[in-house]
Amino acid sequence: MLKNYIKIAWRNAIEQKRFTILNVLGLTVGITVCFVIGLYVFNEMTYDTFHDKGDRIYRINQSDIWGDWNGKMSNTGPNVAVALREDIPEFEEVTRLLTIGTQTVSYQLGNGTSNSFREERFFAAEENFFDVFSFKSYKGDVKTALKEPLGIIMTRETAERYFTDADNAIGKTIEVKGENGDWSTFTVKAVLTNLPKKSHLQFDFLVSLNSQESLKGSEWMWIWTGFSTYGLVNKGTDIAQLTNKLQAIPPKWAPATTKKVFNQSYEEFTSGNPWQLFLQPLEQIYLSEAPDTHLFGPTGRPRSVKIFSIVGILVLVLSAINFMNLSTAQSTKRAKEVGVQKALGSGKKTLIIQFITESVLYVTISTILAILLVLVSLDTFEAVIGKELELMAYITNPVFLVTLLVFILLLGLLSGSYPAFYLSAFKPVEVLKGKLDRGLGGERIRNGLVVFQFTITIILIVCAFLVQKQLAFASSYDIGFSKQNLLQIHNIEQLEDKKEVFKSKLLSNSAFSKVGESFDLPPHIGFGGQFKASGGVENPIVALNNLRTEEDYLDVLGIEFIEGRNFDKQRVNDKYKIILNEEAVKMLGWGTKETFATDSPIGKKLTLVSGERVEFEVIGVVGNFNFNSVKKEIAPLIILHYQNDKFWNYKVGKSTYAVRLNTESVKGAESLQLLISKAKESLSEVSTSVPFEYSFLDQEFEKTFRSEQQMGAVLNLLTPLTLLIACLGLIGLAAFSAEKRHKEIGVRKTLGQDKKQIVFLLSGEFTKLVGVAILIGLPIAFLVSRHWLSGFAYRIDLKIWYFLFTGVITLLIALATVSLQAIRAANKNPIDALKTE
């Protein structure tokens, strides 16, 4: 029986080619979009699922002690792990990771040359790290490798980069420039297989935490938040009870830190806020909204996943709606077939099964085409989102194949149910007499579906348009200095006493107009410490971001001084002076630039509220400039000379030259590459051991809203497809209307109405439907866009013409689509319609 249904379905598909093409096209587009988005969503939601004990691994997060106490931060101090081991027996293991920062690693090749690279994914771990995590060993024993202070573990691809052959890496020695500025020798003890891409922990090197001199004597610290702490809980542990138990840890252990570092009691430091510890399941870390950052790998975009999931489902629903509209539009052609079958004894159940079989056939064909289309287009989508989705791994998975079969059956059932019940309900006597009026109910449903389609479409069009407007605004936004044509050359600290020689060589080339050195780089300037205005007991403590640099760097960026002066090389003591931005002055209660004439902050002093409580004198105030993403408001900033050894040990930092390129020298990508080559050549003339690595400041700023750029690119791909699907649905309804009113059209033409009047008649009702969709969709699009834009501190204004423009464009496209169908109906011979009476 089923074979017979399939034969009938196939015959009808062949006979009704236009209907079949439209149906298959709409379903194929919808399923393709749904598949691609589904791959992305599944990829994002299955991070960190490969660890053997993953269901018992938790990261210990804490209150954001450097910002909003109600927020969360993923990094903790070293003493947290010590406290958990001592006070919380529910943990089977507790382990720590420390981000060491960028290191220079070198391997001597033996012929007077070396492989040297600047390594950013260089971390220190405890020896029990592999008792918690299940990263696989390629060579060597990972469980003993970290027991030796100067043992090192690297990934296979990293070993191949240095030694060519990872199989021979064990026992080789590499040189690492450590935190004290000296080179240390490490021995390779183990090589890991390349880390799974779907891991929130991404590293190239692991050294023993025992190798870090800075940790010795600092185990008591709670504010050195460079660590991530992970716990492996015992089987059967009640996580809610354990979380409650953790809250007793900070009040017991942290006071020693607040007293020693800040000379404050625990209560004074927290200002009465609860210092909490939180347990976050390992598999939720990557895609977490709070905290939204972590130290050791990629961060997911939960909002993008939600948005794309909704869009994928909606596009699939729109495709199913198209199928319904196109199927019911064929009612005139299929009605007599139904009437004859019923007259010959076919029951309603039999007809429903037949029509649903047809639906499943269309879905099956469309699914096969969609998979082929995904295979062809996946590279483009991967390039847009910046991820490899591993489609073949899913296609060859039996679970995927079963899921695909269920998907086909469900989609076929859902999209075919309404047409099946609609067509099978025809009464044979009325059908054979040519009476096909199904009343207002069916018409209202079809009209409602079209309104729904275009409502979704108009929302997507508006959102895609506004995303592009905001991204263009963010790229061109005046951040307070010029970020274009600014080359950043890294590893400058390795030049040591040759830095000035390199600087002179650069400046000898007219293409490089200015050069300045900095140890902190926008847009990644972060927390620098807590300060308070000197001389008053009640003065508030203010958390300031810090920029450690020198006088030339501020000049290279073009930072404007609104009060006071820059650092001066001729004044030796200037290295102990400070410069503030407007926001810092305001937060310290020293007024604004309007009040500087009568109450200048110049000469006032700030006290660092930690350690020896050093005082620094203000010599200048700069205008506010954005040193982070435009998604964030400008924060208070303190600018210190990088040689200020009362604030930090500058000999262990990583510094960069900012090089202002002469505009006349930058005339395209080719000339830019030539300038980079010149800079590299200048460095090699000074030192052959320092790796040449560079970046461009404008590109670094763009990276801060890379996820929004990717979302915009995806919306640009999906919006035309959604509009195409909606227009196909409109074609379906227009075809249905033309079929239903073909006799009326014939009468009107016989009575003298011209084609324009007929086209206007048929197009008018659909224009109203699209107009209703626009009236519904635009307010929703406004609310959605306003919510998305709230994530940017600096954003475009939502002008009414943005919405009117997109509404008019959508209306014109819909009108053109319907008019083509109306013209086709108007061109038919009226005699063909009337002779059926």
Image: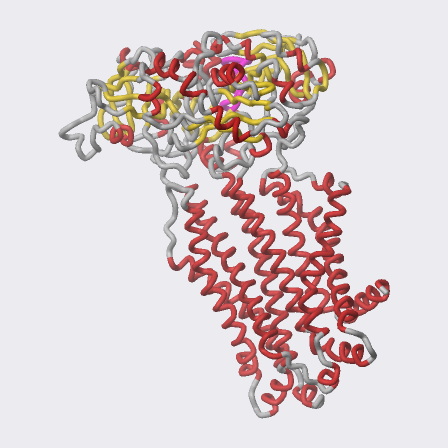
Image x and y of residue 504, in percent: 41, 17
Q: Is residue 503 at least partly visible in the picture?
A: no
Q: Residue 688: say if magenta.
A: yes
- The answer to whether residue 441 is above or below residue 589 is below
Q: Quadrant of the N terminus?
A: bottom right
Q: Residue 67: say if magenta.
A: no
Q: Residue at x 42, y 35 (%)?
A: 629
Q: Quadrant of the C terminus?
A: bottom right
Image check: 106 left or right of 291? right
Is 141 or 491 nearer to us in this picture? 141
- Report the magenta residues as a range: 678-693
Q: Which residue of the protein is positioned furthest toward the bottom in this rendering?
A: 751
Image x and y of residue 827, in percent: 63, 81
Image x and y of residue 531, in percent: 30, 21
Is 59 or 136 nearer to us in this picture? 59
Q: Residue at x 18, y 35 (%)?
A: 594
Image-quadrant location for residue 28: bottom right
Image x and y of residue 422, in percent: 68, 72
- The answer to whether residue 835 is above or below residue 734 is below
Is 805 or 569 nearer to us in this picture? 805
Image check: 712 left or right of 57? left
Q: Residue at x 56, y 27 (%)?
A: 58
Q: Residue at x 68, y 61 (%)?
A: 414
- The answer to whether residue 131 is above or below residue 752 is above
Q: Is residue 79 at least partly visible in the picture?
A: yes
Image check: 249 left or right of 379? left
Instruction: Indicate the colouring scheme.
Output: secondary structure
